[in-house]
Image: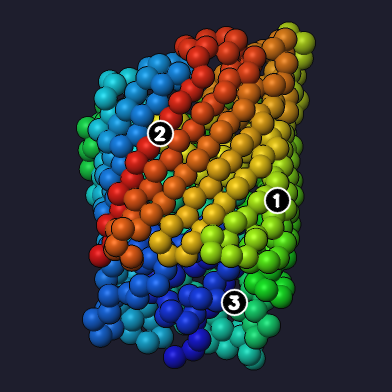
Amino acid sequence: MPARIAQTVAVPAALALLLPTAASAQLVNPAPGQNPMYATAIPEGRTANQFDSLTLNGVLRTRFDAIDGQYRNSRPVSDSMFTSRAQIFGQWDTGPVRLGFELMDARAYPRQPNSTVDTGAINAMEMVQLQATVELGGMLGAGTSSELTIGRMSMDVGSRRLLGRPQFRNTANGITGVRLDRRDAAGNQLLMLWSMPQIRLPREPARVRDNAVVWDRETTDQQIMLASYSWALPNNGVVQLYAFGFLERDAPGFASTDRRLFTPGIRWFQPPRPGAFDHDIEAVAQMGTVSTSNAATARRVDQRGWFIHATAGYTIPGDVNLRLAAVIDAASGDRFNAAGTDTGTTVTRFDTLIGARRWEWGPSSLYGPLNRANIISPSLRLEANTGPWFDMFLAWRSLHLESARDQFAVTGLRAPTGTLGRYAGNQFEMRVRYWPIKGRVRFDAGAVLLDKGRFLRDAPGVRSRADTHYGYFDTSIFF
């Protein structure tokens, strides 16, 4: 059987879950401090459940989280929620062809009737992945190994900032399409993708809160395309050059802003390792057209946005592998005139497509004010990792608007005249993970303090001027 691809841009979960241990050890983490995708169902150091050519693994996660001092302008000031998520991963390996699936049941039970709960927390009984992977061997060149995957999949690409599978959020980002991976003898990798993002259903808030079972759908009215090439560097480093295309149009029951976006980027990444400096530098441009609202008669205007990220870190060798890192993120916001109205020519707010965010911006679920849109945010991080039993981090972020008149990140808050300035506050975060039973049971606890600055306290429509507090506790059982 041809050697399977060990890659920086992660393969779909049902494929990556089942790679042999030797190949898994060569995978480069998609972002600093993040586990490869297969760790969702197969913890590090634990092999897959193999039954001849069939492999089955699963995970059950429960969470309780709570928030007070709400930053949003239309939700309860305090709320709490219990969520559960069950996943079953399976693969049948016939040799040159592998058939894989992932069945997910994600449910939520909020305390407040007007809770923020939505399809980010609920997707009851969904076949997130259902795919066939064909090994092409050296068909695309001597010394290469290639694979073609067709069907439903969920995947990480590069840093996960534009296309990624959330690990903290209760539901997945699924896509349906065709993916080609090619890896040469030097470790350089080519990825080509055409897909349709899965639209999580139902969409009616009452049915979502009832945990109604409705099969998600995909449609050519929304498409995402990707071409990516990664050059392998020593010590698992990588330089990645990529370009995304995103096409969208209205369809019955699906109103959109008709995005037609071209998003090229470049990334230079050196993963953390004891006794060495690491870095992650990424720059992204965005251009295209977009409608000013999801109304059928909305005007179409040009879209021009940008995003940059830079991390520099150092890991002190020792029993706890202490890592210190300095981070800066910046993403463009939209421009408005002095009266706070749209200039009518160009939208300059960056669109992060279907990227993941928890590991950089804090928990989502009932929290989640931050993302890669209209923000400038320096950060400091302190991480500790004792191996397979325990890891933790502490993080501080300073929060500023890139455009004083645009909505800040994904808070829903905007000061149209810009008189509140650009300072939004500080975010302090901590997380601790512990394995009481190695490879079988994991506890995950975290807390966030959103120290509100002038903008978050005084923006029009703010429900609470008090600081926001959020906490959660997870239990994951792997089988």
Q: How many marks?
A: 3
Under tag 1, what secondary structure? strand
Q: Secondary structure at mark 2?
A: strand
Q: Earlier in the sequence, mark 2 or mark 1?
A: 1
Identify the residue under disc 1. Answer: 311
The structure residue drawn at horizontal position 72% and vertical position 61%, both measured from the top left corner, is 277
Between 341 and 294, the one lying in front of the other is: 341
Q: Quarter of the image holding residue 235?
A: bottom right
Q: Quadrant of residue 321?
A: bottom right
Q: Mark 1 belongs to which amino acid?
A: Thr
The amino acid type found where label 3 is placed reads: Arg
Q: Which residue: 68% across, 66% down?
A: 275
Q: Amino acid at mark 2?
A: Gly
Could you tell me which residue is drawn at 43 percent across and 65 percent down?
388
Name the foreground residue: 150 vs 475. 475
Residue 471: give its label. Answer: 2
Residue furthest front as drawn: 319
Judge the density around disc 3: few (<14), some (14-19), many (≥20) Cα neighbours within 10 Å: many
Circle 3 residue: 182
Could you tell me which residue is drawn at 58 percent across and 31 percent down?
Answer: 427
